[in-house]
Amino acid sequence: MARPSSFNREDALESARNLFWRKGFHATSLKDIEAALSLRPGSIYAAFGSKKNLFAEALEYYTTGVEEEFRTYLARAETPISGLIAYVRSITLPRDRDLPSNACMIFKTALELADDESDLKQLARNQLACVTRLFIEAFERARQSGEVPDTLDPRRAALKLQSGITGLRGMIESGLTQADAINLNDDIIAEVERMRSQQ
């Protein structure tokens, strides 16, 4: 069955991303995908090949969105650390629209597929590494500019910050109150600020 003439691949990927982000890979049925994308099975397979391929593209689409958002915060800030702080602060700010999930889709995927022997498991690891690299690069620039001390280890600082953000998002997903989320977020930000104050 041919795809409808109105088919838009990016719109389809956004819908698939939201669906998989909310439900995960295994819990998402073909019927769910049909409803979310407004496509028949034949059109879905013609466009993406398989559920697994669609999921892989949706996860990459999610990662691209994270990277673009992160780089936007860094570009708008006067310094790398200020950009990191602005990005972290955005986690608990009201949003224009509801997210499918408060937790990171990449991390949710890594957890869901931890016991799977599939290329999707490796894809999730690769996407996590891409996001980690963004944080590392920000800390490297901060060190090069003198905003943080030369003794700071960019990779260690990046992993620590990323784990804090991931944990906070997971707790928000599990029902953490807004007040507690803001307090925890303030603690993460204060820790980043302390890196800068050690110059």
Image: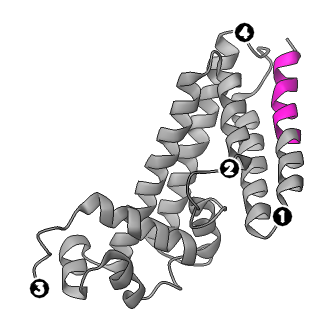
Q: Amino acid at mark 4?
A: Gly
* Circles 4 and 2 in contact, beta carbons < 8 Å: no
Disc 3/disc 1 C-alpha distance (Å) = 46 Å
Residue 40 as seen in the image, left or right of residue 143? left
Q: Please tell me which residue is depicted at 69% across the width and 34% down the height of the picture.
A: 155
Disc 2/disc 1 C-alpha distance (Å) = 15 Å
Q: Quadrant of residue 2?
A: bottom left
Q: Total marks drawn?
A: 4
Q: Which residues are magenta?
A: 187-197
In the rendered structure, find residue 176 and report the number of the disc placed on it. 1
Q: Nearer the viewer, mark 2 or mark 1?
A: 2
**Residue at disc 4, secondary structure:** loop
Disc 4/disc 1 C-alpha distance (Å) = 37 Å
In the rendered structure, find residue 146 and report the number of the disc placed on it. 4
Q: Nearer the viewer, mark 4 or mark 2?
A: 2
**x, y percent for residue 142:** 68, 18
Q: Amino acid at mark 1?
A: Leu
Disc 4/disc 2 C-alpha distance (Å) = 33 Å
Disc 2/disc 3 C-alpha distance (Å) = 42 Å
Give whichever of discs 4 and 2 has the lower sequence position: 2
Give whichever of discs 2 and 1 has the lower sequence position: 2
Q: Nearer the viewer, mark 2 or mark 3?
A: 2
Q: Amino acid at mark 3?
A: Met
Q: Amino acid at mark 2?
A: Pro
| Residue bearing mark 3 | 1
Q: Is residue 16 magenta?
A: no
Q: Please tell me which residue is depicted at 57% across the width and 68% down the height of the picture.
A: 109
* Circles 2 and 1 in contact, beta carbons < 8 Å: no
